[in-house]
Image (cartoon, rainbow, N blue to C red):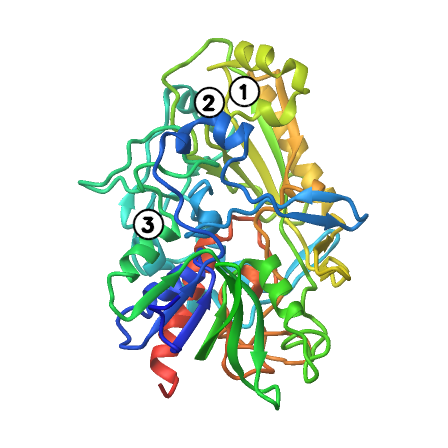
Amino acid sequence: MNSLKKHYDVVIVGTGAGGGTLAYALRNAGRSVLMIERGDFIPQESDNWDARAVWGENKYQTKEMWQNRRGKLFRAFQHYHVGGNTKVYGAALPRFRREDFGVLEHKEGISPAWPISYEEMEPYYAQAEKLYHVHGATGEDPTDPPRSAPFPYPALGHEPHIKSFLDKLCLQGIGPVSMPIGIDLRPGGGCLFCGTCEGYPCQVLAKGDADSCCVRPALEDPNVELLPQAFARRFLTDSLGERIVSVEIEHQNESKQIYGDLFVSACGAINSAALFLRSANEKHPDGLANSSGMLGRNFMGHNFTWFVPFHRKRSEQDIFQKTWSINDFYFGGPDWPYPLGNIQSGGKWPIFEQIYPRFARRFLSELSKDRYFIMGTLSEDLPDLENRVVLTSSGQIRVEYRPNNIASHKHLNRLLGQILKRAGYRFFITKNGYMNTVDKVGHQCGTLRFGKDPASSVLDPFCRTHDIENLYVVDASFFPSSGALNPTLTIIAQALRVGKHLQDQLDW
């Protein structure tokens, strides 16, 4: 702490897809930038790729406990490290469809329009794909929105059994496409094309995560600094409540303040909402920037179900399986005029540890070894004012959530089940994922939505709070809707857009 400055031009809380990318975008601005991170760098060690350590012991997951709407405690599915949750994500980096930025009618409600268009975001999607080493196939997916440039790197190939499965889908008139994946398979890149992307930190730093792609390169600039193992307790305002003057942190068992001109929350949709709620004061009694009453509300993730089909024969060759997706039913399907969502491949991880009873895991896992592959259905979660993040009287995070848009998700599951059976996979198991149980909170978004009207949103279209002139948010909190695709590339693109805005528009 002694080496830190007393004052910074920009203070960013969080180093994930939003915060890490924004620091990278500001690295050449000639301004002092401090990143504050609750955790530290994940060490490059053998446990990075050890299933027992990663999945059995949850070594890299926080031990912090949250509450669900019934008051039951669950271990937060958060990874407090430099790079945030991107250190363990599956590196799927698709763009939202153009239609996702407009109003979409669903069977159970409306997915609202964004205050910006796809065309405004498109240049930053292109930059994000290059920055995070995205491999994909241009022109392959008919739902893919217009592009100003092709994918920077070619699509990944498919493993033998995966290729056979996809050929069977094509015979049914299904159009599987290459999944946009962020890994460093460039010439001279470090990726070993192993099976440890999904859920594992990359031991060779070749995954397209915020740590490898943004934080470390940003730190090469002498004006950019990182303070790890520092928990941001609250933002402190001036006497009028119009500007943030400092952030109060807990570091080395001491409470300290860091002062700055501009502050950015990039803690993730749940933790950013919690930070704003903890920062309540006389001028902001219901939490910072909450004149709209929208702080913490409209919490979304995705409806997600795992499907695990089984091959008749073992295949040790199928290592990297997360290479394909299906968007045929993204905007509707047979006898269903409403959007259904995305079907996508999963990585090779010990899913049976999460499904089978403990007493049967070892036996069934060995029986299933090299016979299965993983896929999932992903449907949009609609915004709902009562799905929200609050704090208990003791300050603990409470996630109040009820699933919605279930009818469409179940219809998509039935379609996939029929497709699998026609392809010869008559035996498969399913497991409801993230949002139906809340304890596996993934793809979190929406708690500080952006918009043009301060009465119905927390942030403006450049993610500045309407109420406080020097406070921004650059994680998925800003999403007004969740779409039905992985959100990370959209977070990255918006962080790049905000970074450009800060350099162009602000009087530094």
Residue 146, position in %: x, y? 39, 58
First in sequence, mark 1 or 2: give its number: 2
Q: Residue at x 80, y 48 (%)?
A: 71
The three-letter amino acid code for the residue at tag 2 is Phe
The three-letter amino acid code for the residue at tag 3 is Ser
Residue 395 in the image: above or below residue 322: below
Identify the image quadrant of residue 29: bottom left
Provide the residue designation for mark 3: 212
Identify the image quadrant of residue 407: top right
Residues marked 1 and 2 touching at CB (< 8 Å): yes
Task: Give the alpha-carbon distance from disc 3 to disc 1, as whole Å.
Answer: 39 Å
Task: Give the alpha-carbon distance from disc 3 to disc 2, as whole Å.
Answer: 33 Å
Question: Quarter of the image containing the C terminus?
Answer: bottom left
Provide the residue designation for mark 2: 165
Q: Residue at x 37, y 29 (%)?
A: 46
Identify the image quadrant of residue 36: bottom left
Q: Could you say whether the residue bearing mark 3 is in a helix, strand or loop?
A: helix
